[in-house]
Amino acid sequence: MTDQELQQLVASNARTIQAMLEQQETTRLRHEEQMNEIRQAMLRLARVEEGLVNMMVSIDEDRPTVLRKLTSIENKVDRILEKENGVG
């Protein structure tokens, strides 16, 4: 191998290494950006979840839910049936 061929090989390897380093940095930055987006999405999701919980608590405190109304009706029907069965 001549001196010139060796220099060309070294230069080619240097360019390849530089390209690989640049690609690695690009990949790292992209990964960092994606992780940040995931963190932001998780924070938004937590805020939405907190809002839903607060809304449910508010609904529960402000007025009876359908489930509680149905339970109340069911209990009344049970008492009526017990009275009828107890009397008859």
Image: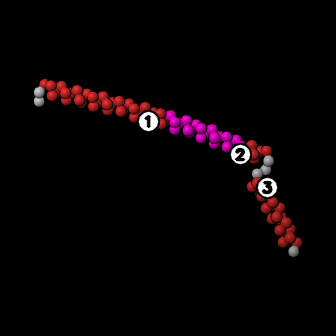
Q: Nearer the viewer, residue 62 or 71?
A: 62
Could you tell me what secondary structure mostly forms the magenta stretch?
Answer: helix
- Say whether residue 55 is magenta: yes
Kind of residue at badge 3: Lys
Q: Compared with residue 86, is residue 43 higher up or lower down, i.e. above or below? A: above
| Residue at horizontal 58 percent and vertical 37 percent from the top | 43
Q: Please give the name of the residue rendered at 19% of the width and 27% of the height, measured from the top-left corner.
A: 8
Label 2 belongs to which residue? 56
Q: Which mark is residue 69?
A: 3
Residue farthest left in this picture: 1
User: Which residue is label 1 attached to?
Assistant: 31
Camera-nearest label, 1 or 2? 1
Quadrant in which the N terminus appears: top left
Q: CA distance from mark 3 to mark 2?
A: 16 Å
Residue 25 lies, in percent from the top left, at 38, 30
Residues packed near mark 2 inside 10 Å, few (<14), some (14 to 19) or many (20 plus):
few
Q: Kindly identify the amino acid type of the residue bearing the numbered disc 1.
A: His
Magenta residues span 36-56
> Does 17 sit left or right of 64 as displayed?
left
Residue 58 shows which numbered tag?
Answer: none
Question: Spatial distance from mark 3 to mark 1, Cα to Cα?
Answer: 51 Å
Q: Position of residue 88 (x, y in %)?
A: 87, 74
**Residue 4 is a magenta residue:** no
Query: What amino acid is found at the position of numbered circle 2 in the picture?
Result: Met
